[in-house]
Image (cartoon, grey):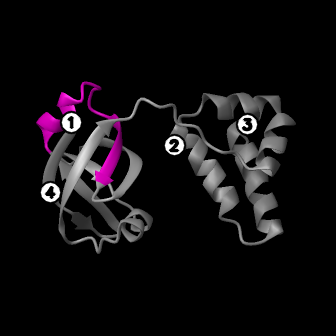
Amino acid sequence: MVTFRAQIQRSGNATGIPAPEDAVLGLGAGKRVPVVVTIGDYSYRSTVGPYRGQYLIPLSAERRDEAGLTGDEEVEVTLELDSAPRVVEIPADLAGALEADAAASAAFDALSYSGKRVHTLAVEGAKTPETRERRIAKAIATLRGDA
């Protein structure tokens, strides 16, 4: 576990917290490190990685809101190596479509955590049942290589 102070950085809509290289490498998990980030009383799971010559911890608008941050302050950050498996909760209707298509299911299973999240977030973000169905169909087509 490492603790440091850093100024939150904004670049357009993207926001991140620079992490000292020695702190990241000191966690002993390489250059893209799964971590639990703690800022004050708020903790979240993320991955620290190299970005434009520095190590950066992503800090989304959702995370800023949850942590009560504006995105322009200096914060104390604690990083802890996250060795827990990252599991994506798959919506039932997407899971059903994957079960019905072995090729799409195999492709989905081979995706990284982030790759799986892309498909599940698209489905979960649909505002109407029709949009949800279209997004599931698109995910299956993409996974099959048809899109």
Crowd rating for badge 2 (residues with CA inside 10 Å; few <14, some 14–19, many 20+): few
| Percent x, y of residue 85 | 51, 31
Q: What separation in Å lies between label 2 and label 1 (alpha carbons)?
A: 20 Å
Pointer 4 residue: 6
**102 horizontally vs 40: left or right:** right
Query: Cβ–Cβ below 8 Å for labels 4 and 2?
Result: no
The kind of residue tagged 3 is Arg
Q: What separation in Å lies between label 1 and label 4 (alpha carbons)?
A: 14 Å
Q: Is residue 34 magenta?
A: yes
Q: Residue at x 19, y 39 (%)?
A: 2
Q: What separation in Å lies between label 3 and label 1 (alpha carbons)?
A: 37 Å
Q: How many marks?
A: 4
Between residue 51 and residue 8, name the one nearer to us: 8
Q: Nearer the viewer, mark 3 or mark 1?
A: 1
Q: Earlier in the sequence, mark 1 or mark 4?
A: 4
Q: Residue at x 77, y 66 (%)?
A: 131
Secondary structure of the residue carrying numbered label 2 = helix
User: Which quarter of the figure is the N terminus placed in?
Assistant: top left
Residue at the bottom extreme, as displayed:
70
Crowd rating for badge 3 (residues with CA inside 10 Å; few <14, some 14–19, many 20+): some
Query: Cβ–Cβ below 8 Å for labels 4 and 3?
Result: no
Pointer 2 residue: 114
Secondary structure of the residue carrying numbered label 3 = helix
Between residue 10 and residue 81, name the one nearer to us: 81
